[in-house]
Image (cartoon, rainbow, N blue to C red):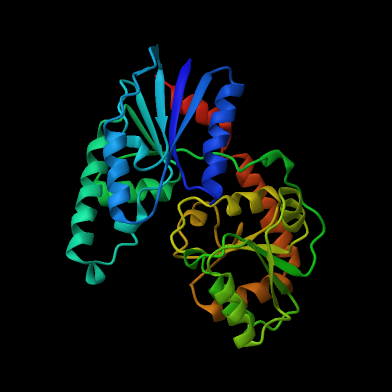
Amino acid sequence: MKIIITANIVPFTPGGADYHINGLTEQLRAFGHDVELLRFPFRFSPDSEIERLMEFCGATDLNMANGVAADKVISLQFPAYGVDHKDHRVWVMHQHRAIYELYNAAEASEEDAAFKQLVTEFDNRNLAKANKLFANSRRVAERLKQYNDIEAEPLYHPPHKADQFYCDDAQDYLFCPSRLESLKRQDLIIEAAQYMRSPLVLLIGGDGGQEYNYQNLIRKLDVGEKVRLIGRFTETEKRVLYARSLGVVFVPHDEDYGYITLEAMLSSKPVITCFDSGGPLEFIDHEDTGFRCHSKPQELALAFDELYDRQQLAREMGKRGRERYETSNISWEHVADRLLSE
């Protein structure tokens, strides 16, 4: 089967989206399909650049590519799902969040409001005409229903090299991997450190735009012995850090999906998350596969200390997390079956 996958690319800004996009491409090829990946260059600002790309995608007909008929098109991102094809399957990673759940009407200008309407109409039009519509998590499907009144089927996929995660004896640290960005809320973790009474160390991994601010916050709160920004790490180092942790902390604001939750479960580690963290809540039940907390530093600190005080519970929760992953049918075989089904 000849398949075209459409998505975006933000030059020099790698992230979880690349694992999703490249993973799907590689797996469909491994299953014997002839797959072409078409990625459109995306800029987050100004809005005029986004509008230009919307117009370009909307005018792109992929039924015939240089005289060769494509059997199916699978689109993953806004505005790439605006392309035209007679058998178009859309698997939404997330929409343009700035005009949906992150939109603040009280601070928006007339131009912002007009752009919001333009994008909403684009989504309503193009998502409604997809032959099949999927979302990469239940949370993304909920947003589609809430903002666009469109139903989508949640469809989960595994993290990169899922079969290579493992569990080792726990050491006295919690692992907190993610890009250092405001929506990931590492500041909550740093602020929680000042209330911790246990000897745990919080290892915050990754880099990003908030690194300087987080370094300053650590100094301001004098928690340098409890919190370490360890920067970027290799995939091998990441699996070791998961394996030897007591647990994993992942407290983003309204996350779409979150590989970190699944990677922790594959490593048999409990996850501490927040009630408003979105995607992780689809897998983390309180005192079953981890802890759910309100997004307050004091409450997070209590959860950190409880994990240290109840390490047998931590091991049991981690084991249940691994079992839950294995019974959730999260596989590329299932993804391909659903995406390509007639």
Quadrant where the C terminus is found in the figure: top left
Q: Position of residue 118 (x, y in %)?
A: 21, 49
Q: How many marks?
A: 0
Q: Residue at x 32, y 31 (%)?
A: 83
Whether residue 260 is visible here, answered yes or no, is yes
Whether residue 127 is visible here, answered yes or no, is no
Is residue 118 positioned above or below 297 on the image? above
Q: Residue at x 34, y 36 (%)?
A: 81
Q: Is residue 38 left or right of residue 211?
A: left
Decide which of 189, 324 is in the foreground and name it: 189
Q: Position of residue 129 (x, y in %)?
A: 26, 31
Is residue 284 positioned above or below 123 on the image? below
Q: Residue furthest right?
A: 169
Is residue 92 positioned above or below 293 on the image? above
Decide which of 124, 248 is in the foreground and name it: 124
Q: Residue 260 lies in what quarter of the image?
A: bottom right
Q: Position of residue 143 (x, y in %)?
A: 34, 51
Is residue 141 positioned above or below 284 on the image? above
